[in-house]
Image: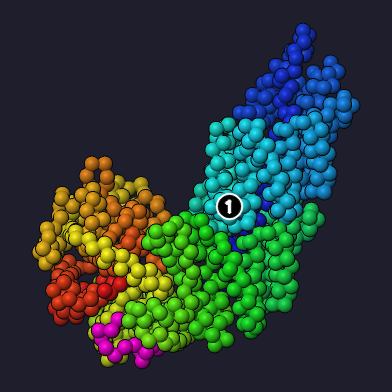
Amino acid sequence: MPTWLRPLNFFTAILLISLEINPLLTPSVSFSASNVAQTTTDRKAQAARLVQEGDRYYYQGQYQVALEKYQQALAIYQQIADRQQEGVILNNIGFVYTELGQSKQALPFYQQALVIFQELNDLPNQGAALNNIGLSYSYLGENSKSLKFLQQALEIFREVHDRAGEGKTLNIIGGVYRSLGQISEALKFYEQALAIRRELQDRSGEGFSLNNIAEVSSLMGEYPKALDLYQQAITIFKEVNDFTRQSIVLNNIGWIYDRLGQYKKSLDFYEKALVIARNIKNLSLESMALNNMGSAYNNLKDYTNARKSYQEALEITQELNDPSGEAKILSNLGSVDDQLRQYSQALDFYERSLAISRKINERPSEGITLNNLGRVYNSLGEYQKSLELYQQALGIAREVKDRVAEGRTLNNMGRTVLLTGNAAVAEKYLFETINIWESLRPGLTDENKISLLETQTNTYHNLEYALIVQQKSEAALEVTERGRARAFVELLAAKYSETPDPPIQPPNLEQIQQIAQEHEATLVEYSINDFGGQPKLYIWVVKPSGEILFRQLDIQSFAPSLENFVTSTRQSIGVRGRSSIEVVPLDDSEAKNQLKQLHKLLIEPIADLLPSDPNAHVIFMPQGELFLVPFPALQDANGKYLIEKHTILTAPAIQVLDLTQKQRVKVQQANPKGLVVVGNPTMPKVTIKIGEPPEQLNPLPAAENEAITIAKLLNTKALTGNQATKKAILSQLPQARIIHLATHGLLDDFKGLGVPGAIALAPSGNDNGLLTADEILDLKLNAELVVLSACDTGRGRITGDGVIGLSRSLITAGVPSIIVSLWSVPDAPTASLMTEFYRNWQEKKLDKAQALRQAMLTTMKNHPNPKDWAAFTLIGEAE
């Protein structure tokens, strides 16, 4: 279960963005000296050649060599008293130092250049020098001085009608306002600059402006827009061979994935950025990448590498005299100690960071550090001081329009107020937080929604707790549903709808009651809440009449190892995964004891609320590790299995039931006639682990017999061996009414798709035979039932959005009812159970849930171990 706050999720990503200072500038006069008319004197010609060489090395990213060439040229121009070219080269030397991240060294060169251009009354070059002085002050954290020089530069460029210079200055001014936290002002200047760059067909300038607008978009939580703009920017920078800006954009993209909770993916982008920074010997970019890597490591709880990366970054920022960067890294170092509960060290780092941020008037950094300090005092039990710091941080977050910082501050305030016992005020803060979280999701991909929701789950749990302690259990159920499988619900709604991006709201109480009534089922929703380190299990029961009842119990004795207890219960009956290693079951009495313990935890508190009719439907909505519980096998105190007393289904969320029911109606209207029954295809070769050679999966002869038997029951022909190719089956799936796949199910994310799982079919031509969960997502199926009679097909990556795997993909593809297995299923009892299921469903006309229940009851007579009959679960619709 997530804790109330993972500090690095909260703090570090926000800190990073301020380091990514406006990578947008090229001085107007940079390298223009290479076009200076040549004279007949050898000295002037020699200087001009040196300038051309310097230009070439600069554009190749060899800044130190370029610097040497420019300095040699400068000496010559000073000797021959060519003041114009002396000014140009002074400016260019300053710019190389800027590129190297050494703004303090750059500033005097720009200032010397400005004196010369004023002496010569050279307005265009005065504008360029003023521009670069303003940039240097911005990098040094002196924003008021920066704006003063930049405004002078802008006036000059407009006076001489220099549109390129005007565009550059507008971009820099936007960057200064961004640093000051004045986001609306920043965006206004960035957009003006972009329009000019496009008007002039200035590709590099366009890339700079796109990058900066993307940065503002990401700060405002508009992640899809930001990612699109960054991709446009990096395409341009690759096109023009600009390695410096490629590194910066890679950092920025990594930062977005950091905020989305995809820390390994963000680390990959940061590492690429670091390689480029070191290749071009840019210390400022190296520091930025190291800082960001530290944050990714911190979020991954690799504190050793996090501290190491931060320390390296800090040394560079101190060497460069970069107070802005130093403040952020100090705060990040504090967050490592904070996470490790070393609060005195954390406070020291945070206080040092806050002092610097206030000195240079960098409001976003100040707000983040105040928030970090608030967290420490919260951990120390000083709630009033904590709230005062949070209030200050909230004001800044709203001032700089940082939606994520605002949401996380409100979450922290809600949590703190809740700890003081004021649940009503906490409720207000936490509802505000959830409204912000939900505003960040539109436009994101399914994968990004899932990872973002993982970072936000604690808010829903905090609010759930606040409502429960106020005796608002029904309102708490609405909140639980609001945070349950939201990405899945939105994905289903989009796939099932005939209009793009249909509006989908979480169900209110009346709609939840209506769903129970329409399904004529008892709905059971679980939530594990560990607020305040006192874990509780909340259970809501919604009866077919619409009546809602609530029970809760303390699970302190279970919670520290609830996941382990579920796993050990599965192992106690001999359950194993796809591995060929057989799990030795415990003796019968011990296995039954563990099944009884889970029954006592999950069923006994609500047993009196469940229907007495064994044919009545009970639909369980588990959470987290409870998805792996074998509900049919749970035993009451008298040794009776749950499946003997109830007809069981499962679903990720109540709202999913509403959507699958609507899809069932569509499937019935489509009335597909096809039947696809597959068993024991010629197995593909699979790479189980990266770096190891592929292995052919073991054949499943019993699955072939199962398929042949079921095909006869359905009056069709089974596809087996070489007939069961991926290509052949894909062509038949859209027309199929029933799909039965008796083959291996694979859990691993074979192609790095982010959606784990694959079904093993026979390879042919160029395909490898693996029908992945990602490919299934893109299908449009009309089947009323898919049965995955295979190993572990009901499992997958468990997230706050439910189980991400094959079942999720099939439901999204349009199938309202799925039967999957929760473990590797023995051959003989599976064949018997599946045959019984189809006989009950097709011949006896039972609904799918009742048919599966009767098949389990029949199978257990000959195979009494739950391992042999309790693996399968029906997800979705019973009819």
Is 103 on the left-hand or right-hand side of 527?
right
Task: Give the amino acid at mark 1.
Answer: Trp
Which residue does the image show at 66% across and 73% down from the upper left?
Answer: 413
The residue positioned farthest toward the front in the image shown: 669
Please state if 663 lies on the left or on the right of 53 as rendered. Answer: left
- The image quadrant of residue 106 is top right
Q: Position of residue 595 (x, y in %)?
A: 31, 82
Judge whether 683 appears above or below 602 on screen.
above
- Secondary structure of the residue carrying tag 1 is helix
Residue positioned most to the top:
40
Q: Which residue is mark 1?
A: 255
Can you tell which quarter of the image residue 46 is in?
A: top right
Is residue 114 depicted above or below 865 in this figure? above
Q: Nearer the viewer, residue 611 or 751?
A: 611
- Is residue 162 shown above or below 270? above
Q: Residue furthest right?
A: 119
Percent x, y for residue 424?
63, 82
| Closer-to-camera residue (390/383) | 390
Q: Position of residue 514 (x, y in %)?
A: 40, 79
The quadrant of the picture occupied by the C terminus is: bottom left
Q: Which residue shows up at 74% across the image and 73% down it?
A: 388
Which region is colored magenta? Answer: 604-617
